[in-house]
Image (tube, grey):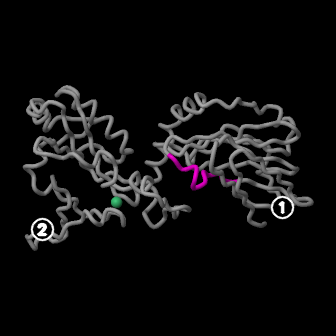
Amino acid sequence: MEFWGAKVKAGKTLKVKPGENCLIHISQASLGKKAKKEGVSTLLYATVDDKKLLLGTLSQDSFPHINFDHLLFDREFELSHSLDRGYVHFIGHQRNKKKKRANESSKVSVSFNTGKSVLQPCLESKTNLKKQKIHNEHSEEIKEMNKSIKELSEAVKTLQRILLTKADLPEEKEAPKDNEEKEDSCNFGCKEAKGNNEQTIFVKGFENLRPRNEIKNALTNFFASCGEVTRVYVPFECRNHLPLGFAFIDLRNAKGNEKALELNGSYMGGKELEVTMACRRDEYCGFIDFHGCDRCQMFLAPPVRNPSSIKKHRIYYW
Ligand SMILES: [Zn+2]
C-alpha cells in the first residue's frame, strides 16, 4: 500500500490510472489554500467510463474537508471540480487488488465526519454504478445541501470536542496564513469581539457544549424580549474554537437593559442564566485561563495588581 495524492486545479481535469492490478482508494478531499475564501463552495466529480459522478461538496464555511469511506477505483478515472480558482486536494492510497478485504464490498456509505459526501461509488460494482445519480452543477443546490446538513455537521463537531482531548485533535494541514483567515479563527479577531461598552450585558450559565453559532442564536432569541439584539459576542479559545462559557450582549436601546437584568435567574434550555451588566463585574473583563493564539497575544495585558489573581488576565477593555 502506498500513499496517493493529487492536486486538481480550477478548470482542469486530472486523469488517473491505477497501476496494474491496483486499486486507488481516495479517502479525503479538501480545499486548497487559494480556494479558502469565505463563501466558497464547490462540487467534486469523478468521470469513469464516460459517466460523470458527483462525489460531494466542499464549502469553506461548513465543510472544507470530505472523508470518503468507499471510494475505490480499479480503472482509469478523471477528477474535476467546479471552482473558478484555486485547487482541490485529493488524497488516499494505492494498493494491490488482491489485498482487498471482504468487508470492502460495493456498498454505498456516507461519511458524516467533516463534510457531506453525496455519492460514494465503488467502481467494482457496475450495478451500483448505475444507481449513482448525476447531479447538475448549481450554486443554489450547494447552498441547500449545505444548509440541510449543517446541523448534523455541527453536532458531530460538538461530539468530537467532547470525545477528543486537545492532544488528540489532528493538526491543521494548512495553517491559515493571510490576515483574513486568521481573523476568522481568532477570538479577538472575530467581528463581534469589538464593541463592549458601559451598556453591555454579561451572561453566563448557558449550555456551553454547543457550537458557538447555536449559542449565539439561542441568546439572540432569548433576549429578543428586551428589544433588538444588535450584538452577541460568545468568546472562544482560538486554538480549538471551544466557547468559554460566557457571552456579551448589546441591545439597540439601552432601556432594554433593565428587562435583560430581570432575566437573571431565568432558564434557557434548562440552564439557569446569570445576567449582569458587564462593566460592573470586574472579573468578567478578564478571560480566565484563556490561552489565545499568536495573533491575539497583543491583547493580553499584564496580570491584574492583585497577586492572588495573578493567573487572571484582564485583557478586555472598553
Ligand atoms: Zn487569538
Determine crowd level at label 1: few under 14, some 14-19, many 20+ residues with C-alpha closer than 10 A.
few
Give the mark toward the camera: 1 or 2.
2
Q: Quadrant of the N terminus?
A: bottom right
Q: Is residue 13 left or right of residue 231?
A: right
Q: Is residue 298 left or right of residue 84?
A: left
Q: Position of residue 264 (x, y in %)?
A: 13, 38
Q: Is residue 287 left or right of residue 213?
A: left
Q: Position of residue 44 (x, y in %)?
A: 69, 42
Is 251 or 155 nearer to us in this picture? 251
The verdict on residue 31 being magenta is yes
Q: Position of residue 6 (x, y in %)?
A: 73, 57
Residue at label 1? 99
> Residue, x 35% and y 63% (percent of image)?
295
Is 105 or 214 nearer to us in this picture? 214
Region in magenta: 27-37
Q: Quadrant of residue 216?
A: top left
> Residue, x 28% and y 30% (percent of image)?
221
> Residue, x 31% and y 47% (percent of image)?
208
Q: Earlier in the sequence, mark 1 or mark 2?
A: 1
Circle 1: residue type: Lys
> Residue, x 77% and y 47% (percent of image)?
13
The verdict on residue 218 being magenta is no
> Label 1's element?
helix
Ligand 1: quadrant of the figure? bottom left
Label ID, residue 140: none
Q: Is residue 39 left or right of residue 239?
A: right
Q: Position of residue 265 (x, y in %)?
A: 14, 38
Determine crowd level at label 2: few under 14, some 14-19, many 20+ residues with C-alpha closer than 10 A.
some
Residue at label 2? 304
